[in-house]
Amino acid sequence: MEEVLKRLGPESSSRLLRLRREGWEKFNSLPWPLKTDEEWRRTDPDSFRWEPAGFDPKEALQVSFETPAPEWIRSGVIVTDLSTALRQFPDLMEKHLFRTGRPLGLAKHVSLHEALWRQGVFVFVPDGVKIPTPLRVRISESAGALAFFPHVVIVMGRRSEATLIDERIGAAGGGNPAFSDEMVEISVGEEGTLRYIHLQQWGENISEIYTQRTEIARDASFLNIHAALGAKATKAQIETILQEKGAQADLLGVLFGSDSQHFDFHTVQDHRSGQTRSDLLYKSALKDSSKAVYTGLIRIEKQAQKSDAYQANRNLLLSDGASADSVPMLEILADDVRCTHGVAVGPVDQDQIYYLNSRGLAPAEAEHLIVEGFFEQILQRIPAEELRERLMSELKRRLNGA
Amino acid sequence: MSGPLLEIKNLHVSVEEKAILKGISLTIEKGQVHALMGPNGSGKSTLSHVLMGHPKYQVTKGQILYKGEDITGLKTDARARAGIFLAFQYPTAIPGVSVANFLRTAMKARFGEGYQPKEFRKQLTATMATLEIPEDFATRAVNDGFSGGEKKRHEILQMSLLKPELAVLDETDSGLDIDALRTVAEGINRMRGPALGVLLITHYQRILNYIQPDVVHVFINGRIIESGGKELALELERKGYAPYEEKTQGERQEVPHEAGH
């Protein structure tokens, strides 16, 4: 395995090489999680157990992106794959890669990612640069891949502004069972604005570990729309750190499950400074025997007075076999804050169905319209019409059972 | 097809084993407006939902014939597509679904092949204008945060576009101020004609100043106690429901007496 780690590189950075080795050691020293671990009580850890023996670090993914317009390149905007970034911008990589801190949980899988990461994306928007049109990147599974470790780094400078649409696409025709262990690092500089739309459409052959960690500086704002439509099973941890005064985060999730898909999302809204605001809304609609687990923590630290935090999780069960667990958690150490949360799990409202039936819509058609409306509240905030429509038509297709 | 538009024959309806409608017979001819007047809790709304086929209500006896066909077992959506419309007393909110999207979907369901997407916008705008509904209404979510008056106008807007043959209006006048009442009543009057039958369910005589009924029924405790012309509504206005309620209480008292024999 030593040979594999060396081949993964990068030779240019002793820090990154050291981190890789440390990750590998940590991975080996930790046991695989058990069903009895608090973190894994609602999701079978065996779905995410992957043995690295015989791992071949060949290209398991295709990373593609739209090159920004020349004016933005001239301003110093970077959108590229990680290997290119390591070659062309070693200083930036040194400064930003693995710098947002370790995710709180999922230690075994995070260590594995740290040991075996290679392919991924680097997005950099320098101070003062505001890009009006969305940037786009996409990571696709290569046919025949067994395991992959995507890594995304997004760096927004002071007073910069951008929208990034980031997609995951499964191999055509499904593919063999595969394991994805991904990490996304985001930092938004002072007064910066990032809208990050993550669209997960892995095939149902993939089990996915996903960690995302965002640091938001003073008076900066972060909008995150995370749409999870694919994968057989997902265990995700999305941490948002409101680091400095005036930081704001709007965190939206759209989950659609069918067959026996399983989603487990853990979110953390970590208010570390005063006058910060976070507003989270995760919605899932679940068909067949799919399942969604949501655990959300709001933490307001002692010095974070006058913070404002909101968290809501709503689950629509579209069949008797579907289920959802929702667990809000609060850890409030400051005394002058506003903090509210709400949870709902239930089937489609029969009064709504009846009202639509009375206008001639057949029951299935009525249900579809209600589910569309359920997601509309989030989808309308996607700042790219084409993507919004694509997502809606994908949801419709899935509702229709295709 | 000839014969009446709607024929209700000795209809008995229960909810969770409790009898609500106790033998209703009512015939509405095409082109007629019938007013069904009764106090709160008499079962008026139950009748409206039974006509629309709400799954909660069980027809324990009797029949509903629509255009000569027994629709007693027909599902709600099939009734709607066949041209029955219910204006709800309490319309349901559908968050996230715009009025325009909702109406378009409903029109497609109602008219099938006959739905003309190109005409839809024009029709919608024109109908909204006659009902004095502002344009941005079409982008709002269905009944979500609507005022009482907006909900009722929205019901009449739907009725105008869906062109039913039988319209059941369940307390469409309730909660409306006088201007809104006039607008809504004018909307209904515009649709009156030989092809439409209306069952106007109301507590008050007020709306009948704007919509002239052909027949008035007094409805108390799950039964039609008396039927007559529009003068009956005025009589009700003068005397109130009390004399009629006494009449039904008298009937009820006879029941244990008879059972005792």
Image (tube, rainbow, N blue to C red):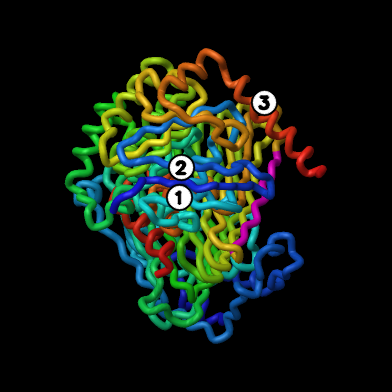
Mark 1 element type: helix
Q: Residue furthest top?
A: B238
Q: In this view of the protein, which residue sits in the foreground, A221 or B242?
A: B242
Identify the residue shown where x is 17% and y is 47%: B118
Magenta region, main secondary structure:
strand
Give the mark nearer the N terminus: 1 vs 3.
3
- What amino acid type should be assigned to the residue bearing mark 3? Asp
- What amino acid type should be assigned to the residue bearing mark 1? Ile
Q: Chain of mark 1?
A: A
Q: Residue furthest bottom?
A: A54
Q: Is residue A328 above or below residue B177?
A: below
Specify whether disc 1 shares its chain with disc 2: no
Q: Is residue B158 left or right of residue A47?
A: left
Q: Is residue A197 above or below residue A23?
A: above
Q: CA distance from mark 2 to mark 3?
A: 36 Å
Marker disc for residue A370: 1
Identify the residue shown where x is 32% and y is 51%: B110
Residue under pointer 2? B94
Mark 3 element type: loop
Residue under pointer 3? A336
Identify the residue shown where x is 38% and y is 70%: A140
Q: Is residue A385 above or below residue A231?
A: above
Q: Chain of mark 3?
A: A
Specify whether disc 2 shares its chain with disc 3: no
Q: Which residues are magenta?
A: A322-331
Quarter containing the N terminus of chain A: bottom right
| Cβ atoms at labels 1 and 2 below 8 Å apart | yes
